[in-house]
Image (tube, rainbow, N blue to C red):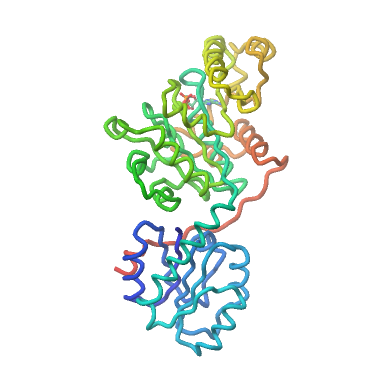
């Protein structure tokens, strides 16, 4: 779970409870007074549990608290205070606060508050609509699959404010993170894939966060870490991921194996990426035969023409006739901006926001969420800090 705590005092009891009961949760502590807290800030806005540790309630913004609770029907808000208990209880309940504790009750009662929040959240997951799983596969090596899928994921997060996860399942080359960030911290798929207690927060904490709403789970960095990963483990990650993110992208390598087959089985859509030259046509035909053998409906497959506009391109109509399939989208060749983005280790959207390829990716993201004009992104930066560093 995501737990956000707003507290201006270094409260030992609070730290002890959180350390003992929330080891696998993502805990963010905002060292500020509750009166001044911005409940729409990114560190708070997605919280499953919001704990407000108040010195005084005199200037607490009850309206903001009510609006937070209305927006998050499955989250739990708890208030810790020493004010006139009976009066606060009524007011708190009116604005949707579920629990009110006195400071002296933290050690005894907060663990139960957290467990109740866990149960509420688990129950709500049954009603939450699962995120879509989109898989990207090269028709032949070098199609642009990792570059395009990671940049499209970034655009979806940035322009449309959707929570997007990209899982790099290319265990051989693991290019996706390299294209979009030079941050190589964080854990990898290999570190969490075997965890039996995997949940959304644990998954998210293992990812690199790029931009506002895009998370990237790197492929294992050593062959030893990849050995022994099973299709069921991949399946489990996808199940957890789709309950926690709006979109789950999977970047595959060209060679099919039991892991990529499982990812494709679980996908809502598969995007084979090709270039419109002869060797790619043969590669695409081979993939099409596999899709038929797996009984995937045509509607699940969305063929993408990448790097179009080069001098050796074959006419689109000829390729569509040979493949008996229409392209879902055409992406232009944008060598200069693609190179600049890779060299800088930054997303294309940041390097060339108005470039031809960026515009095509925005158009694609519009189609994914079913709108025809880009939505504006929300503002706000993460101001969270890890619990330990603050309480420590
Ligand atoms: N539309 C494009 N315009 C220009 N260069 C591109 C485009 N798409 C991909 N590339 C480049 O193609 C190269 C190979 O891309 P990559 O994503 O690694 O391919 P794949 O994952 O299919 O093997 C990268 O250097 C990338 O910058
Ligand atoms: Mg790749």
- Residue 339 drawn at (x, y percent): 48, 29
Q: Is residue 275 above or below residue 69?
A: above
> Is any part of residue 185 visible from this angle?
no
Residue 29 vs residue 73: left or right? left
Which corner quadrant of the image does residue 356 belong to? top right
- 166 and 80: which is toward the camera: 80
Q: Residue at x 48, y 88 (%)?
A: 83
Please identify the quadrant where the C terminus is shown: bottom left
Which corner quadrant of the image does residue 88 belong to? bottom right
Please identify the quadrant where the N terminus is shown: bottom left
- Residue 246 drawn at (x, y percent): 57, 46
Q: Is residue 155 above or below residue 251?
A: below
- 312 and 99: which is toward the camera: 99
Residue 59 vs residue 168: left or right? right
Q: Residue at x 43, y 65 (%)?
A: 115
Residue 358 vs residue 11: left or right? right
- 272 and 150: which is toward the camera: 272
- Residue 318 drawn at (x, y percent): 67, 10
Which quarter holds ligand 2?
Answer: top left
- Residue 212 drawn at (x, y percent): 52, 50
- 21 and 310: which is toward the camera: 21
């Amino acid at each position: 779970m995501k737990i956000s705590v707003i507290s201006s005092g270094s409260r030992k009891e609070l730290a002890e409870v959180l350390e003992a009961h929330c080891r696998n949760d993502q805990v963010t502590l905002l060292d500020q007074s509750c009166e001044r807290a911005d409940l729409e800030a990114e560190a708070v806005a997605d919280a499953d549990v919001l704990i407000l540790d108040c010195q005084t309630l005199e200037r607490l913004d009850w309206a903001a608290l009510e609006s937070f609770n209305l927006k998050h029907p499955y989250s739990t808000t708890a208030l810790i205070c020493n004010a006139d208990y009976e009066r606060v209880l009524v007011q708190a309940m009116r604005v949707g606060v579920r629990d009110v504790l006195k400071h002296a009750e933290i050690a005894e009662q907060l663990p139960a508050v957290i467990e109740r929040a866990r149960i509420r959240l688990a129950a709500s997951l049954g009603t939450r609509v699962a995120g879509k799983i989109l898989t990207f596969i090269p028709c032949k090596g070098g199609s642009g699959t990792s570059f395009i899928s990671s940049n499209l994921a970034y655009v979806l997060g940035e322009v449309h404010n959707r929570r997007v996860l990209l899982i790099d399942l290319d265990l051989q080359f693991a290019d996706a993170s390299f294209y979009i960030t030079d941050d190589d911290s964080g854990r990898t798929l290999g570190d969490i894939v075997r965890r039996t207690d995997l949940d959304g927060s644990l998954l998210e904490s293992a990812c690199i966060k790029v931009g506002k709403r895009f998370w990237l789970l790197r492929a294992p960095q050593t062959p030893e870490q990849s050995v022994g990963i099973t299709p069921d483990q991949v399946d489990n990650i996808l199940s957890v991921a789709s309950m926690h993110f709006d979109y789950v992208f999977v970047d595959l390598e060209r060679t099919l194996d039991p892991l990529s087959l499982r990812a494709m089985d679980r996908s809502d859509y598969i995007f084979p990426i090709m270039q419109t030259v002869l060797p790619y046509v043969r590669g695409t035909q081979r993939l099409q035969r596999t899709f038929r053998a797996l009984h995937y409906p045509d509607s699940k497959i969305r063929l993408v023409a990448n790097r179009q506009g080069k001098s050796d391109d074959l006419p689109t109509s000829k390729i569509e006739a040979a493949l008996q399939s229409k392209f879902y989208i055409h992406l232009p060749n944008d060598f200069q901006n693609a190179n600049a983005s890779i060299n800088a280790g930054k997303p294309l959207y940041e390097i060339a926001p108005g470039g031809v390829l960026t515009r095509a990716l925005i158009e694609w993201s519009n189609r994914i969420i079913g709108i025809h004009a880009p939505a504006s992104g929300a503002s706000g930066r993460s101001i969270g800090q890890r619990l330990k560093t603050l309480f420590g």
